[in-house]
Image: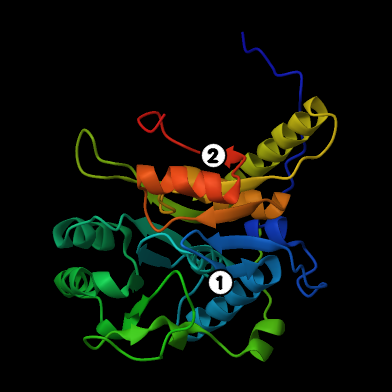
Amino acid sequence: MPIKSRWSTPKPRISLPSWVFGSEQHGPRNEKIAFVDADDPKNTLTIWEFESYSKRLAVRLRRLGVKPGDRVLLFCENGIFVPCLFFGIIMVGAIYIGATSSSTALELSYQLKDSGAKVLTTTTNLIETAVESARTVGLEKSHIFHQDARSHHQINMSHEGVRSWTELLSPDHEAESFQWFEPPNPETATCCLNYCSGTTGRPKGVDLTQFAYVANGEAHLLFHRLQQEAWLGPYPAWALCFLPLNHAAAQTTFIANYPKMGVETCIMRQYNFNDMLRHIEKYQITELMTAPPII
């Protein structure tokens, strides 16, 4: 028979953006830092900037023709603006798809075709692979954008005919009046299509709903409260993200749960053992989400 936990927590049936940023879509600014570039600590995003950039992206995605249920694929390395792209997609009711930055053109074209992605965003150093993959599946170049996920201080220029992601950023005043998509039933509203490694065959997309992410977050919040009780009160927390943000574990922890909890996250572009140790010491990291091989 099932053995139930002695702890329980409510699972609100709201959208993931409402859970992270609050249901009051135009409330006061939260100036607490959410994300820090591990290689450039002056490059940061506050909670308010995180929400604002997400809205600005959502406005332009909607104008580009992206509708609820459409798929948008991110083929990029980690960076402090990846969470904004993630939420910008979800705020318009579309479905986020992440592809590992080590994907070959063949692997990426399979994922583009299998998912039916309508928009592809990549980093500047991966444009060649992105364009080749898009050409294979017939995705128009007008629906491909390049960006530096670590910085928004980027000249609005095209590279190899691919437009800059700055063209996906609406003016601030449009974002201020934007209302994100609230699904009628979060339990059936897919927000992410995460692909497995394909160990026994080709990678397979796994649907994850907004309700599943919110439920995971509530469990994480409960665990955090229990930790605080064990420590006899709140304690300052800093996290380090070196896991790829195209994976569900990193998405839930670093993109959704930690901003909700007010935990500041330092984001590494990619995993490197020596860099990880250096950042742990430099930033006095207290929270690590890792994988068994790293341990």
Report the front residue among 187 and 46: 46
In this rendering, is residue 14 above or below 179? above
Identify which amino acid the numbered label 2 is placed on: Leu
Q: Secondary structure at mark 2?
A: strand
Determine which quarter of the picture holds residue 227: top right
Q: Residue at x 36, y 42 (%)?
A: 273
**Residue that mark 1 sits on:** 92
- Does residue 241 appear in the picture of this structure? no
Q: Is residue 2 above or below residue 187?
A: above
Q: Indicate left or right for 41 with 197 as reference.
A: right
Tell me residue 180's x, y (percent): 65, 71
**Distance CA(mark 2)–CA(mark 1):** 31 Å
Give me the residue at 56% from left, 62% from top. Answer: 36
Give the residue at x 26% y 83%. Answer: 141
Q: Earlier in the sequence, mark 2 or mark 1?
A: 1
Residue 278: image location, x then y, percent:
46, 47
Dot 2 surroundings within 10 Å: few (below 14), some, or many (20 or more)?
few
Residue 203 coordinates in the image, percent (x, y): 26, 45
Please tell me which residue lies in front, 260 or 34. 34
The quadrant of the rendering that contains the N terminus is top right
Whether pointer 2 and pointer 1 mark residues with C-beta atoms closer than 8 Å, the reply is: no
Colour scheme: rainbow
Q: Mark 2 = which residue?
A: 288
Percent of width and height locating residue 255: 56, 55
